[in-house]
Amino acid sequence: DLPGTESLQIDLTNVLALTEALQNRTFHIVVDSAAKIPLGMNINEDYCDNILMTCNLLKALKDNPPEYFLKLSTIDVYKISNKVNENTKVSPQSYYSLSKRVSEQFSEIWSKELRVPICILRLTQIFGPRDRSTKFIPSIIKQIKENSKVRIYGDGSDRRDFLFVEDAARLIVDCCEKRISGIFNLASGKSYSLLEVVKVLQGILNKKIEIEFFERKKQRIDYEFDIKNLVNKLGPLNLTDLSDALKITCHQESLL
């Protein structure tokens, strides 16, 4: 509902409808944030749709390209080992991450052909209010709201990088305003163990959180990211402290 803007609801898998909707429209900046994260059994369908949505958008924009294109991707395109930077080997380990990597490549080729500056942001775990994904923080907040035990697979020492959604949105806007180009990891650069996150939530809610440990389903992977390249382009990121971000999230989820 911003003045001077309009909203379009379009099925990005329908290239004809998309092309018609964007015809004769001029865009200074386009941000491609569309993605389907497989939650059920239609893994191959979701994989294909992720690639199709990007390809259709690029095709629809080809005759009247924007001045700048920003593509949101995922840190899951990397083969995680030690501290990850933008030079870490890309080796998708899931259908979802593979679809995002292929979408990156289509976007890069399109960018070169049309000479449109492109920025690809590989996002870490984003969290915040009204998140209904199955990632760790939204999952445990849902369990706390239901007065259930918090489920942790493994011993809880696994380390993750979390970025507050308000920070992520602000940094995406910063990238667009400064028209930075290249591939960057959009992360906090600071990792916490799963148990550390639970401990922070206990302090915020002022109550003991019961934990139920389960056998690890996957090999342990610790996520730690080098964000120097992004800082060099944007300057200090001024990120919200994890405790403050969780407090805001809990308040808007009616836990406070």
Image (spheres, rainbow, N blue to C red):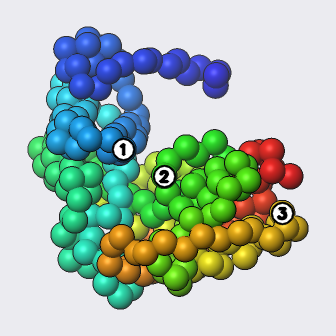
Which label was assigned to residue 134?
2
Q: What residue type is labelled 3?
A: Leu
Q: In which quarter of the image is residue 193?
A: bottom right
Q: Residue at x 35, y 58 (%)?
A: 74
> Which comes before the other along the chain, label 1 or label 3?
1
Residue 80 locus on image (x, y percent) = 31, 77
As drawn, the label of residue 217 is none
User: Within the image, what quadrant is residue 23 found in?
Assistant: top left
Disc with the residue nearer the chain's start (2 vs 1): 1
Residue toward you, 116 or 149: 149
- Residue found at x 21% / y 53%: 95
Check disc 3 and report its element: helix, strand or loop: helix
Query: Disc 1 residue type?
Result: Leu
19 vs 146: above or below: above
Q: Can residue 238 be seen in this view?
A: no
Judged from the image, the secondary structure of the residue bearing numbered disc 1 is loop
Left or right: 12 as drawn, with respect to 29: left
Q: Is residue 147 left or right of residue 31?
A: right
Badges 2 and 1: C-beta atoms under 8 Å apart? Answer: yes
Task: Give x and y (percent) for residue 59.
Answer: 17, 29
Circle 2 packing at 10 Å, graded few (<14), some (14-19), many (20+), is few
Q: Residue furthest bottom?
A: 82
Q: Residue 205 carries which label?
A: 3
Q: Residue 39 carries which label?
A: 1
